[in-house]
Image: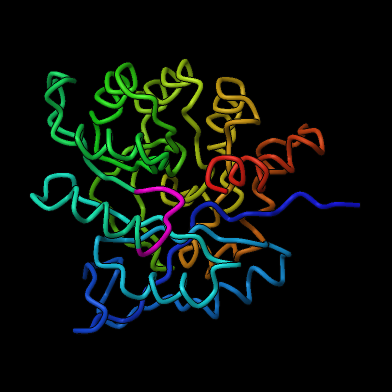
Amino acid sequence: MHRQPRIDAHAHVFRRFSARYPRPVSEIYPVGREACAEDLLAAMDRQQVDVALLIAISPDDEYLSECVRARPDRFWAVPTLDPRSPTALAQLAHKADTLRPRGIRLHWLGLPGSDPDQVPALPVLGEMAERGLPLWFFGPPGQLVLLDAVLGRLRLTVVLDHLGFPMTRARSDRFGRPVVPASPESLTTVLELARHPNVHVALCGHATFTDEPYPHPGLGAAVTRLYRAFGAERLIWGSDFPFCVPEPGYEGTLRLIEHHLPNLSPSERDAILGGNAARIAG
């Protein structure tokens, strides 16, 4: 019987900071920390995961590029762009030509309250729409309201990373994972975006938004509300490798689907664990 592909829609790989591999350096990304593709592949093989979308942690993506070129059968690229850069459109064209990306990640669109027709990211988003490149989005508070307005002007496929919660200044927990408090208000904004049929939500990075130990039961209600609003056909699973490795482990991120959505049908589960990502980014 043909098996639905299992796709990890949110993983990171990076090398320790160096002149060859520049990247952000912070409490979460100290100079010596690295997440090697070989370790990710080993975890994927143990759980029969076919493909991982590699989400770049910054516009500097030399190592990601090496991994995608070496194993295009197992790794798909989602590079990051800063739309504020004066060369953003040129960077987009270059990445599109060299990486064959399955999406582009942005962290910022414009100042909250901006006129949607004057959003600084609009030229980049328009070019992405022309190229058929989905937007992987994880931004600070206030950005989803702008995104809502922009989606009234562009036909763009969107994946909201990390349950759709906003990106704020994170601290590092004892496992080296980023921790950011989640708020009910931000979930409400995410749920409102469900009215756009081309918006999807990545179920990943749960531990970032709660101090509760695995399986993070306090987030179960949020995941259930996302399921009711978006349906199984617009949810995708991601491991958030390497931050999942110390606890609960790569396998544990897969089992979170069963913990939070125990009544899924087999077809719904297959869709969340790979079928939807294959449709969006395949």
Is residue 155 shown above or below 29?
A: above
Q: With respect to residue 61, does 218 lie above or below? A: above
Q: Is residue 263 left or right of residue 70?
A: right
* Display coloring: rainbow
Query: Residue 81: x, y in percent?
Result: 25, 52
Residue at horizontal 45 percent and vertical 38 percent from the top: 159
Residue positioned 49% across, 54% down in the render: 10
On screen, residue 226 versus residue 82, left or right, reads right
Q: Nearer the viewer, residue 280 or 217?
A: 280
Q: To which quarter of the image does residue 229 belong?
A: top right
| 43 relative position to 93: left or right | right
**Percent from the top left, x then y, of residue 94?**
27, 59
- Residue 126 image point, x, y percent: 27, 33
Which residue is painted at 40% across and 67% down in the image?
A: 174
Query: In the image shown, does 5 or 240 lie closer to the viewer?
Result: 5
Question: Image check: 185 left or right of 71?
Answer: left
**Residue 61 against residue 278 in the figure, above or below:** below
Q: Is residue 243 magenta?
A: no
Quadrant assignment, res 47: bottom right
Image height of 164 relative to 60, above or below: above
Q: Which residues are magenta?
A: 98-104
As drawn, which residue projects farthest toward the left? 86
